[in-house]
Amino acid sequence: MRRKKLRYRAWHRGTREMDLVLGPYADAHTDAMDHAQLDRLEALMSEEDPPLLKWVMGQEEPPANVDRGFLAQVIADHQARLTK
């Protein structure tokens, strides 16, 4: 149930741009994630869309409290989808 809710939240963020970043990522990866990884995804998804989009696009550096390693995985996944 948690995975299903996360996938839904990833696709219904409020801004289409972030839906297109987090939605495909959640669809592709949540089934294989363990509890700790799901926590990381939830923490990232708790961020507001405008700053999150700026971090994804490389326009701003995320603050120190953001899990930059996990954010980098999401960004890499998004970039790989764009090049297909």
Image (spheres, helix red, strand yellow):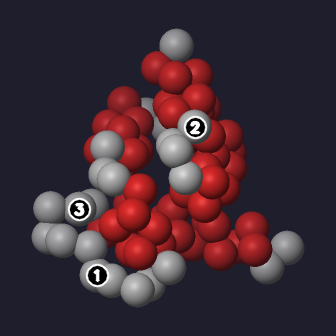
Most extreme residue toward the bottom, as rendered? Answer: 59
Q: Residue at x 39, y 63 (%)?
A: 50
Residue that carries the numbered disc 2 in the rendered image: 12
* CA distance for labels 1 and 2: 24 Å
Residue 26 spot, x, y in % from top left: 59, 43
Horizontally, residue 81 falls left or right of residue 4, namely right
Q: Is residue 12 above or below residue 80?
A: above
Q: CA distance from mark 3 to mark 1?
A: 10 Å
Q: Which residue is mark 3?
A: 66
Label 3–label 1 contact, CB within 8 A: no
Residue 63, quarter of picture:
bottom left
* Residue 21 in sight here: no
Name the foreground residue: 56 vs 27: 56
Q: Secondary structure at mark 1?
A: loop
Image-based side of 24 in relation to 36, left or right: right
Is residue 16 at all visible to an observer of this figure? Answer: yes
